[in-house]
Amino acid sequence: MIQPLFDAETLLKPTGALVLADGAVFHGYGLGAPGMASGEVCFNTAMSGYQEILTDPSYAAQIVTFTFPHIGNVGANLDDHETARPFARGLIVRQPITQAANYRAEQGLDGWLKAAGLVGICGVDTRQLTRHIRLNGAPNGVVVHAPDGVLDADTALGMARAFPGLDGMDLTQEVTCDAPYEWTQSRWHHGDGYGATGSAHRGHIVCVDYGIKRNILRNLAATGARVTVVPASTSAADILAYRPDGIFLSNGPGDPFATGTYAIPIIRQLVASGKPLFGICLGHQLLALALGAKTKKMHQGHRGANHPVRDLASGKVEITSMNHGFDVDAASLPSGIVETHRSLFDGTLCGLKVDGQPIFSVQHHPEASPGPQDSFYLFDQFMESVDAARQTAV
């Protein structure tokens, strides 16, 4: 029997609220940890994978509104973490969380949120909030959980207006690893769990960690690669000292132009090395900046697991997972940089390559966590360029 999180008496008194910097207030009921958390309020349209979303470092300094109403019904477990802890600052859902009803659940989502210190609310009209974001852009806001029902809206409004916003914010240093490490886990398979890499390797890939997701690393390992992860500020000389066969630029949060103050010079040296290079999300944006293109803040961003993207070379349409609030300006691509993928929602640039060189990147997330697996082939495509480079070097 599935029991609701709240009884009828509790539902008579709101214990949560979302207060936006523009003065809009959405009342609801508190979830997870009590307290107040500020950030940029966005929405995600995925129907599953809420745990992966909340532990994705790309959501640092953001409050996630889930447009799918039944969030939390399959519970939470340690296997589905994309990093060691949540990086989102809060969450907003429509329906109260019910007891977990899934064989993989280790605890309920509300208990997981409490243990992680993550503030959330339910009972909000998420359709109305989503329309507000679509019309006005992603706002700054504060999510409040006050179990005693005393909601300090004035303090929350002050916090929302004091939040500086993601434009111009470098968040990579908050989410990158502290020291280099080797990654040895492969993809998950039903009944077997996660696999392990063997001793024989197809090539050595060094991943620059701007906020990397574990399933990206698993997909790289699944190709047969040996995978080493290094912090975001690692110099090009130190990266090349690993004698990599290929270099990967990871996803991550914040404004790419702000992160680029230290990342762009490093990436330019990596490009000049002639090594095969692959970037995803923030890594894609940073590569574009290093190549001479420009990035810009989006009105509302792309966040969900159902975004159609066209491969311009083949004409194939892929359904992809996305999570980004900045994008690369297609009109700013310099000569020799080719657009490879385009969003069929709004026509924004979703992929690029350097003409004649094994260097490419995509805006979407091909690791499918959460999301479809249409773009898994990009990891194989990267490793094929690594294979070719190794054969040429022999």
Image (cartoon, rainbow, N blue to C red):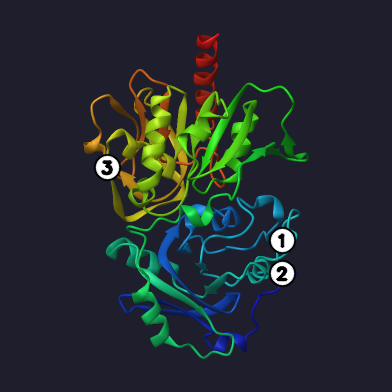
Check disc 1 and report the residue beneath it: 101
Element carrying mark 2: loop
Check disc 3 and report the residue beneath it: 294
Position of 297 relative to 226 (above/below): below
Residue 379 percent coordinates (x, y) = 53, 29
Element carrying mark 3: loop
Front tag of 1 and 3: 3
The amino acid type found where label 2 is placed reads Ile
CA–CA distance between discs 2 and 3?
51 Å
CA–CA distance between discs 2 and 1?
8 Å
Quadrant of the rendering where the N terminus is positioned: bottom right
Residue 242 percent coordinates (x, y) = 58, 29
Within-10-Å neighbours for mark 3: few <14, some 14–19, many 20+: many
Element carrying mark 1: loop
Position of 252 relative to 15 (above/below): above
Q: Are marks 2 and 1 in contact (CB under 8 Å)?
A: yes
Looking at the rendered structure, which numbered label has been put on residue 2? 2
Quadrant of the rendering where the C terminus is positioned: top right
